[in-house]
């Protein structure tokens, strides 16, 4: 049996930084309550551990509960400008761990919106990153996630396009071809983060060589779902799992070459647990 790990898998820089800062805040021993706006990462094990240590997850609709001096961690997905202003007015201590790649997208959108450009965000309109980015142009961006949606856009005088950081490169390129025809003056920025591209390329390459492919990550993780889609095209035995507990003997018993990749919110120890479970089933643990 061979277990092959994708060259790039697991925590990305932005997620690793967010988690480290969250645990640093816990270690300060402050008496003020510590919250996160939404789950800090799409990983149930990490979220559960933080909850045990007293970190409470709030949704945007619950922010009225915050009091002056409370600490709120802004996760790597980022938030809108309006929300920053609201938190400042309430006197909340904001611990901003927005991923630098996401912050770059926010800055581009704000800059070009102020210059008078219409904004197109290529991505999932329901994803917190996209919702947050839209908040840097007064929530007036056009959000498209397919060639068909791009075709239905009107013609613009001046248009600026950006991408969700976890978008599949090919998907961005396809939609970009349509957007080029949609404006008299068109500027665009491929804001897919480098870590995302590397993970997708590595998963694509590995899934062509294996009998079974495990994609480890939260079921609600956008970047993990995209890795699954890429792997499924190359390997029919592709499984999206959150933990080693989901691996059953029948998934691997007939196969000898097993591949593993993991989303940007998956800790190394979860990857190690999956490897050990596979070895145990195969009698090599």
Image (cartoon, rainbow, N blue to C red):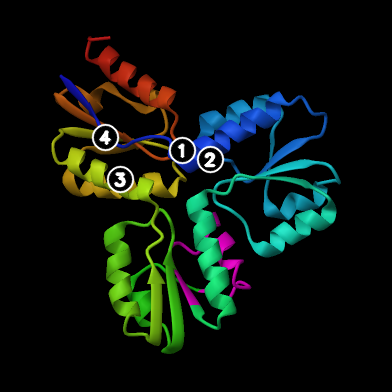
Q: Residues within 10 Å of mark 1 (few under 14, many from 20)?
A: many
Q: Nearer the viewer, mark 2 or mark 4?
A: 4
Image disc number at residue 7? 4
Estimate the spatial distance between the alpha carbons at disc 2 and disc 1, rounded to whole Å.
6 Å
Residue 98: horizontal and vertical position, in percent? 57, 49
State yes or no: discs 4 and 1 in contact (Cβ < 8 Å). no
Q: Is residue 216 above or below residue 111?
A: above
Q: Residue at x 15, y 19 (%)?
A: 1
Estimate the spatial distance between the alpha carbons at disc 2 and disc 4, rounded to whole Å.
22 Å
Secondary structure found at label 4: loop
Secondary structure found at label 1: loop
Residue 236 appears in view: no
Give the residue pinned by disc 2: 41
Give the residue pinned by disc 3: 198
State yes or no: discs 3 and 2 in contact (Cβ < 8 Å). no
Give the residue pinned by disc 1: 265
Residue 202 appears in view: yes
Q: Residue at x 32, y 18 (%)?
A: 277
State yes or no: residue 136 in magenta.
yes
Q: Residues within 10 Å of mark 3 (few under 14, many from 20)?
A: some
State yes or no: discs 2 and 1 in contact (Cβ < 8 Å). yes
Looking at the rendering, the stretch of residues picked out in magenta corresponds to 119-141
């Amino acid at each position: 049996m061979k277990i092959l790990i994708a060259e790039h898998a697991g925590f990305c820089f932005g997620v690793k930084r967010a988690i480290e800062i969250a645990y640093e805040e816990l270690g300060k021993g402050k008496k003020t309550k510590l919250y996160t706006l939404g789950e800090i990462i799409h990983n149930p094990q990490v979220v559960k551990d933080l909850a045990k240590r007293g970190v409470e997850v709030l949704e945007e609709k619950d922010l009225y509960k915050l009091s002056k001096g409370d600490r709120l961690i802004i996760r790597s997905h980022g938030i809108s400008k309006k929300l920053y202003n609201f938190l400042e007015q309430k006197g909340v201590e904001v611990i901003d761990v927005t991923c630098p790649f996401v912050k770059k997208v926010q800055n581009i959108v704000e800059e070009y919106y102020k210059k008078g450009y219409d904004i197109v965000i290529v991505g999932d309109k329901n994803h917190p990153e996209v919702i947050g980015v839209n908040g840097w142009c007064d929530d007036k961006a056009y959000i498209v996630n397919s060639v068909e949606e791009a075709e239905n856009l009107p013609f613009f005088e001046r248009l600026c396009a950006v991408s969700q950081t976890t978008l599949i490169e090919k998907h961005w390129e396809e939609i970009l071809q349509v957007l080029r025809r949609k404006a008299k003056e068109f500027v665009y920025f491929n804001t897919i983060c480098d870590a995302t591209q590397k993970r997708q390329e590595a998963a694509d390459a590995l899934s062509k060589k294996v009998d079974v492919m495990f994609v480890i990550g939260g079921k609600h993780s956008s970047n993990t779902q995209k890795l699954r889609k890429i792997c499924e095209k190359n390997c029919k035995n592709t499984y999206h799992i959150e933990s080693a507990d989901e691996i059953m003997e029948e998934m691997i018993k007939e196969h000898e070459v097993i591949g593993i990749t993991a989303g940007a919110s998956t800790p190394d120890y979860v990857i190690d647990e999956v490897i050990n479970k596979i070895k145990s089933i195969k009698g090599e643990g």
